[in-house]
Amino acid sequence: MRILLLTRSYPAPGDLYQYPFVHRRVLAYRALGHDVAVFRFDPDRPAGAHLFDGVVCETGGLEEVRAALARGRPDVVAVHGLSEAIWPACTLVDPAIPVCAWLHGSEIPGFLREKVVLIEDPIRRAHQERLLEGRIAFWHEVLSRWPDNLHIAFVSADSRELMRSDLGALVQDARTTVLHNPIDTDLFPYRAKQPADRFAVLSIRPYDSRSYANDLAVEAILALRARPWFGQMRFTLIGDGPLFAETLAPLAGIAEITIRRGFLTQEAIAAEHGGHGLFLVPTRLDTQGVSRDEAMASGLVPVTNAVHAVPEFVDAECAGLAGPDDAEGLAAGIAEMVESPALFLARSAVAAARVRAQSGHERIIPRELAWMAECAAS
């Protein structure tokens, strides 16, 4: 197929944490022989292009989109991050060409609502509340007159139900599907962990929203300091964002903790996986599911919160699970594996196997391509 991938975000040199999971799709589609062009729709940026990992990503507004459509003559337009911001570009697509759109997070009103609740600054919160109102109105308008060529994929069953909480029967099963984000198990290969790996805990997170619950990770680590084996632990916390310094300040000076500011390439993330056994990935809003599953693919055992879609992807057989906002539960999840190496090793093997069975790229990529081909043929 000729695929025009239209996205609101894409990785760039020096800006690695922009939809890396979309980039993995592009590489996978191309590896299977499909012709994929990437377009980042952003009318506020100067029109142009950048190269990332061998992929040219064009950037521009409506005129550039129109030119890309005419030049590429796609069989299908794959959209990532569909909202009112990118919709004007979608309206340029010939009605005979399917628009296959993935919803990943805040495009879903219920997801955005829960993010808004966590914003402490009243001015910023008021702005986001207006955005939420606009997003609900947008979806009502689009889905009430659902264009024949629009097809929507949700990355979890929970996210589709969250969409229904605002839009009800407008969210039609016949026009939507659930396709989990594919995990590149070649990039994140499973290497059997050793008992000593349970003492090495990794966290790689953005620090730009309380939805990532990084404060819970800090509380959990501090709670573990009373354990007699804490001196054997090694915590590596990597990330960046406006909340980075203040969130991690309570951990300053603790010998067992290494803090590194910045984001990593996916190859560097895979290398970090190799030196750790536990992946501390708390969440208030089912955030960073792809990072969690990539770590699982490498054999790390995630320690997370059982909120929203998280139980669709992990259970007590392959993870340490805490309740919502439960830092003590996160600490207990780490402690039980430190104190039971057999439990750690068993969960590690199950985690790697579950990702491959449920979300491995060899399973999901063909399903995505088949879905797009089916939409193009209908």
Image (cartoon, helix red, strand yellow):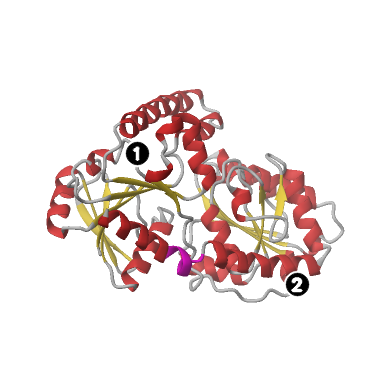
Query: Is residue 117 located in the magenta-colored stretch of the structure?
Result: no
Mark 1: few/some/many CA within 10 Å (<14, 14-19, 20+): many
Position in image of residue 296 (x %, y %): 60, 64
Task: Give the structural element (helix, strand or loop) at label 1.
Answer: loop
Q: Which residue is mark 1?
A: 83
Cβ–Cβ below 8 Å for labels 2 and 1? no
Task: Give the structural element (helix, strand or loop) at label 2.
Answer: helix
Q: Residue at x 60, y 51 (%)?
A: 312
Amino acid type at circle 2 is: Ala
Position in image of residue 125 (x %, y %): 48, 26
Which quadrant of the view contains residue 274? bottom right
Look at discs 2 and 1 and give the one toward the viewer: 1
Question: Relative to 29, does residue 15 appear above or below in the rendering?
Answer: above
Is residue 225 rendered to the left or right of residue 264? right
Q: Which residue is mark 2?
A: 196
Amino acid type at circle 1 is: Ser
Position in image of residue 218 (x %, y %): 68, 47
Q: Which residues are magenta?
A: 360-365
Quadrant assignment for the N terminus: bottom left
Position in image of residue 62 (x %, y %): 18, 43
Considering the whole magenta stretch, tell me its main secondary structure. Answer: helix
Mark 2: few/some/many CA within 10 Å (<14, 14-19, 20+): few
